[in-house]
Structure formats: C-alpha cells, structure tokens
Amino acid sequence: MINSKVQIGLIAGVFIALGIGLTLYKAISLDLPLLPDQYREVWTVESKTSFTPTRAGAKSPVNIELKLPTAQAGWVILDEHFASSGFGFSIVEQSAGSNSVNASPNTSAARWTRQELDRPTTLYYKMQVYRASENAVLPALPVSVAEKPLLEPDQQAAMDRLLDRLHTQSSDIDSFVQLLLQEFLRDSPDQDTLFLIDAYEDDSFAVLMDVLAMADISAHQIRGIVLEDGRRRQTLSALIEVYNGQRWSVFDPSNASPGLPNNFFVWQRGNGSVLSVIGGRDSSLEFALVSNSLPAKAVVGMEQRSDKFAILDFSIYTLPVEQQGIFKGLLLIPVAALVVVFMRLLVGVKTSGTFMPILIALAFIQTTLFIGLAIFLGLIGIGLWIRSYLSHLNLLLVARVATVIIMVILLMAALAVISYKLGMDQVLTVTFFPTIIVAWTIERMSILWEEEGGHEVLIQGGGSLLVAVLAYLVMSNPLVEHLTFNFPELTLSLLGVILLLGKYTGYRLSELYRFRDMGTE
Amino acid sequence: MAKLISPFELRDLGILGMNARNISFIGRYNQRKNYRLVDNKLETKSAALSRGIPVPQLYGTIEYQFQIKDMLNTLIKGRDSFVIKPAQGSGGKGILVVVGRDGEQFIKSSGALIDEREVRRHSSNILAGLHSLGGRNDSAMIEALIDFDPVLKDYSFEGVPDIRVIVFRGVPVMAMMRCATHSSDGKANLHQGAVGVGIDIGSGQSICAVQHNRIVTQHPDTKIAFNQLQIPHWQQVLELAASCASMTGLDYLGADIVLDRQSGPMLLELNARPGLAIQVANQVGLRHRLAAAAKIADLTDNQIEKISLARQQFSQLTVATGQLSMAII
Ligand SMILES: Nc1ncnc2c1ncn2[C@@H]1O[C@H](COP(=O)(O)OP(=O)(O)O)[C@@H](O)[C@H]1O
Ligand SMILES: [Mg+2]
C-alpha cells in the first residue's frame, strides 16, 4: 500500500516535472510565449490538378505545367511540397521579358511529365502561407498598351454607346472602371450591355476586358484563391487590375469594390493560363484550404528554419495542418477529463455516465454555450416526454434504446429544418450532439425518473450539465487552448495530477454536506 | 439548514469518506476476483447454501427472454407472493416485491396493483440489463417473500426490513437496520428513502435513525419511535454476518441479513462496496472502529472470539440505562 502510494507519487512527480520542464525549456530556449499573445493565421493551400489522359495506355506523353504563385502583397510562403509519384518533376523559371502576356515579373512553374499514363490522375502541390503584413501593395508592373479587339459593326456600335455613357458619368479611370463593373452587376443592365454579353456568349469577363481595351485602359486579370477555412473544392477566382495613369489598382468584379481583398491570395497576375495540360483532357484545378492559428514566434521559426527550431520538427507543427486541427481538439480532452476527475473525486458531483459530460462539452464547443444548452435541454426534454409514452409500449430494452436513437435523430432533423426556416442558423449546429449519447442519457434519465423520482433526475442531470459546462469553459479558454496546443508536453503533467488525484483519500466537498448531521447527537 | 461540517471535524470523528473507502479499504482489502461471488446474488445464494447458511428460498431463475412468455404458468404458478430481482442488481434497483394476488392482478407491497404484462415487462428489463452494473445482460431470480419477524413489524412500512452489518477481516464493526418506508416501495435501501437505524454492536439496540442522511426520531409512516428497538437473535445475526467473510474471502464486506419469522436470521445478500450512511445512523465514524477491528483480527482467528471482543469494544450503549457511553472507543 505504502509502496504503491510512493510509486504513484514518484511516477506522478516525474510526469509533472517532465511536462513542466519541457514546457519551460521550450518557452525559454525557443522564446515561445507561455501566454497567448500574437497569433498568425497560417493557411495550408493544397492544389489538386486532375486530368484524364487523352489516349490512355498508348505511348502518348503527358506534360502538365502549373504556374506557381510568388509571394507578394505581404504574403509569405512558408513551405512548399509537391506530390508527383511516377512523374518526372521539375520547376521551370520563366523570366518576364520573354513573355509579355504574362505580366508578372518572374514566374516559375511546376512541370510534371510522363511518357505514358493510363488512368485519370491527380497531382498535388501544397504550400503553407501566411500574411506577414496587412496592406502591402502589389509590386509595380510594366504597363503594356492595350490591344483593341476587332468587333462586328453592331457590337462596335453597342460598345461605343456604352463607352460614351460611362465617359460622361465618370471623372477618372478609377471611377470609370467602378461604374463599368457596377453596370455588369446590376439586376437589369441596359440594352447595349445585355447585347454585348449575349454576343460574347455570356462571358462577361471577356466583355469587361474588351471594354477596357476599347477605352484605352491597360488592364489584365489577377487569378487567385479566396481563402475560406475548410473549403475543399475552391476554384480560382479573378480580379481586374487596371492602370490609372500613375499606378495599378485592383477591382473585384464580383462586387465592384476597389482594392485587393484581404482574404485573396494572388496566384498569378496577368492573362496567361495558370494550368496547361498536354496529352490530357478534362483537366481541372481545385484547392483545399485549411487555416490554423499559430503563435507568431513559431511561424517566424518555421520561416527561418533555424537549427534552434529543430525541436519544432518533433512537435505537432510538423503534421499536416488538417491533422494539427484534429490534435488541437484532442489535446483539450485530457483537460476536460481532469475537470471530470476533479468534480467527481474532490467535489463529489454525481453525473449520469462518467465521461458523458465531456462529450456534451465537445458539442458545446461547436454550438457555443447557450445555444448548446438550449438545444441539449430541448432534446432531452422532448426525448423524455416521448420516451414516457414508449414506456407503455412494453418494448425490449435494446429495441427501446434503438427507438430512442432514431427519435433523437428525427428530432434533430426537425429542429434543424424548423430553425433554418425561421432563420435561426445557429440551431443548425444541433448535428454536433452525439446522438447515441443523447439517446442513452434520455433512457437513463427516464429510468431514473421512474425508479427514484424527478429529484434524482435533477441531481444527476444537473450534475452532468454542471460538469459539462465547466469542462466547456475550461476547454474554450484561450490560455488553455494555447498551452495544450503549443506545449503538448503539459499533458504529461496533467496525467501526473490525475494519477495523484486517483490516490486522494480525503473528503469530498459533498461529504461535508452529507455528514452534516454527524456529531449533533 | 444547509450548513456544512468542517473536514477537520469529520476527521476527528473518524468519518470514512468515499475516496478513502474506495482506496484504503475496498481497493486494498477486497480482491477483484472475489467480487463475482457477491455481485451475483445467485452465486452468493449457492455458496451460502453449501456452507449451511440460511437464505430465502429460490423459486427459480429466468435466463432467456423466451422463458418470460409463460413464466406465469411455470415459475410463479400458484404462488401468491414472490420477489423478482436482478441477479446482479444493487441499491434496491429492479426489485419487484409481490405480496399477494387480486384476481388476475398482483399486489405490490405498497398495495398498488399491477397486471401480468407489467410483471413480464419488468422481467424482460431485468434480462436486458437495465438495472444491472454496467448494463450487462442479466438473469432474473424469483425468490420467496420473506415473512419477517413480527417484533420488527411496526418499524418497517410496506416492506421487509434488513440488517446491514459491516464486517472487517471477520470482525463485525458496525450495524444498521434499514426500514422500508412508503417512498422506498417495499425495499429497504437508503437510496430509495428507507430509514437507517444505527444498531449497537454490543447490545443490538437502536442508537439513532436517519432518512436521506438526516436524523429522524420516528418512522415517517408508522410514527413509531425508534429508541425502543431491540433486534432479536443479535448474537446469531453477528455470527451469520461474520461467517460470510470467510465464505467470500472479502475483508471489507457488508452483509444484508433479514429476520425470518420461522427460520430466524437469513442472509439476503452481500455487498463488496457497502455504503457510508451507516456512520450517520450510528453517529460514529468507521475509521477508529476499523483500526480497532484490525487489532482484534491480529489477535485471534477464532470467529466467536472476534465477535465477543467486538461486542465488548464497540458497545456504545450501557445495556442497563440505554444511554450513550462514547467513552468505550
Ligand atoms: N425475498 C424478499 N422478500 C422480501 N423483501 C425482499 C426480498 N428480497 C429483497 N427484498 C427487499 O429489497 C431490498 C433490497 O434487496 P437486496 O437483495 O438487498 O438487493 P440490493 O442488492 O438491490 O440491495 C431488501 O432490503 C428488502 O427490503
Ligand atoms: Mg441490499
């Protein structure tokens, strides 16, 4: 006994010391902040180039060239990675002078080649980028004279009328462009515009470029990605860049607003194609995007790749960002487990199901607290009500719990649909509640109700919710989030504490109440 | 009313807390392999029978759902009273006490009527593991209704009282009679609202009574005062409880004993994790008693000697006056 106590004490001590020691070492030697301060949004952009070989099986070489982005407008590329199994791979540099269509000063492209290919293939290029400075402008570009298009007479006439109108309404080039873009965004553009769009087979972007050329305005498109976290099939979008006499300015044709949007990552400036596929068809270029907040210091470390940061090579940061996101959540669970251990062993709160509160707390993280509470109580309440009817049906237990599970799913669907119709989008997060757990909770509560009355239901239900809310509050605390993710070794210390609590033989808080009538006789 | 007691006071009183019970006694003295015998009432029963320890008669067991369909024509055919309980239940959960029949219907101990369907449903729930530890599949046992000693009649309402004796290393350390109340529905489990009456180990007399961890002086339903209670066959009760220790190999054990009108003390069931409310009912903490019991157990291996030493040392009442004399321990 003493032996095992000493043993546990030693093990726990080693764990706690190890966790804190490693943390301090990292904090001091790497200068990683112990408190959450500056964070950087690091985006992982994964481009997927898919195509089908034109002549499968036959000896027909394929050659895929993907223009690569250069870091500009304050963006920094941290890391690049190419997946090219079975393909010859090279990076080709293209200098600006040789190719005037492509307006970017120096561009490089990834080239995958292969002698023969017999099935549809996807090639990956992945990079991590973050924005080091906010309103960095795009670098200067040489101005090229716009080439005017040759048009049919009727198109030319429509174009002239449109230009006339825009010229009279605008004062300078910027306002001209803005008016033009607004014209294309209107619900009912005027006759001439409609005619032009029709003549260009609905390619309004081409109309735009030609109108600008006719007006003697140098312009080209900017291709890039609108960064949205969690998007899996994002495609390239286009902005327009025009030269207004002194400098280049950017416009977003989708809302006619000037300036480079903050969440726009520039892939290519200029009109050349981003992807060229020789020997393949049905090619497509899609992007998967994940964003992740990392401490500024760690990001700088990754950028410098100095030896000092070698230790980061063994940290969670080295994982692909998607997995990092998963671990971010996983590493919070030990903290929640500590909350449960604490509440049960030291406070003596009764819960229904030992770790059920953690699952509820995880759902709360997705739904936010109050909405989560409302949804949970709603589900349990309605569930109990329907379950009380089921009790009369005299079903076998397994069938009954299965019924409750289905019922909960239907309830969740109903709740989602109704609230969506009512415009309460937050309630849609109902799907994050673990169905099976909710169903078992309903079943247990209802039995508890039948056997021990509503009082006990309130005690255990209230206890579970209390623990769940506490676990949620702890898990969503920014400091906790920061520490668990950046110093995962602290989990060892946590383990040590839990081991020690496992040997705690003192009283629980609830026992001070339970035994309050002792010694009164 | 919601005042708390300080942890230091609890420690001075020698109160055993839940954590200490789990780690220092159950975890330390009770080996997991011995739990099987006590966690399954059927196994307890057969082990007791093989040692000549009296137990309530077993009418039969239901192990499969198909047996439920005609249980009324087989197991409980012609029986007016019986008790159905999960073999691996605890805390009085899932126990159905039937005291008589009214035509097609059954009378529960509270007087409420239930029909055959209800009995079947109850049995089926037991088999599905609804009341059992961890929701494991279970079997239902059908037992004879105890016809309990009329001396205790007024102390229990609509249910059979039982006597819980905590035995540590073969030494009885603390006892409590548990009296059913209307709210406990024919079962004498404190969780369900039964009254616990602390019983003096030395004399078998009542010390103090609690319901829901609060002190009461009279039975909430029958209104009888508890201070005159004297358990009959007290020595036999203690011997019965102590003999379970060697039967199970558990050093820290709670024995539930009922007093049958004809056969005297009978073993109802055993618990490897007996509750702590017994301390409130006795107004004494377990810690000092357990320490003293350890000394007794070191002193002698003889069961009768252990009991007589326990009766001497753990007596809180002087038999003649019925007054508290805490000085002894
Ligand atoms: N055969 C029986 N006859 C009458 N009452 C019984 C019988 N069996 C159990 N009971 C009642 O149910 C209570 C709990 O039974 P018990 O066997 O100790 O199960 P548990 O493990 O759930 O405590 C007893 O205290 C008693 O009041
Ligand atoms: Mg019992």
Image: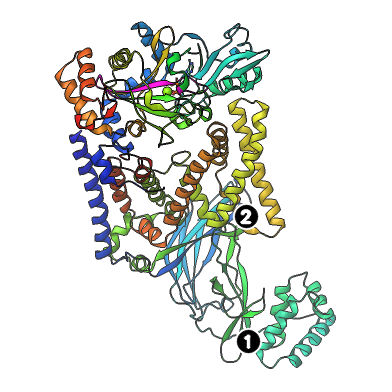
Say which element carries label 2.
Answer: helix
Mark 2 vs 1: CB contact within 8 A: no
Q: In percent of the image, x 28 and y 63: which residue is there?
A: A27
Mark 1 falls within which chain?
A
> Which dot marks residue B137?
none
Residue A402 at what x, y percent from top left?
A: 61, 32
Left or right for A392, reference B51: right
**Residue wearing tag 1:** A145
Looking at the picture, which amino acid does disc 1 mark?
A: Val
- Compared to residue A453, the image places residue A203 above or below, namely below
Residue B84 at what x, y percent from top left?
A: 53, 17
Count how many numbered circles sit on residues in the image: 2
Q: Quadrant of residue A516?
A: top left
Residue A126 at what x, y percent from top left?
A: 48, 59
**Residue wearing tag 2:** A427
Left or right for A17, reference B187: left
Q: Which residues are magenta?
A: B155-174
Instruction: Return the residue nearer the eye: A397 or B76.
Output: B76
User: Can you say which quadrant of the picture contains the N terminus of chain A?
Assistant: top left
User: Can you say which quadrant of the picture contains the C terminus of chain A?
Assistant: top left
Q: How is the image coloured?
A: rainbow
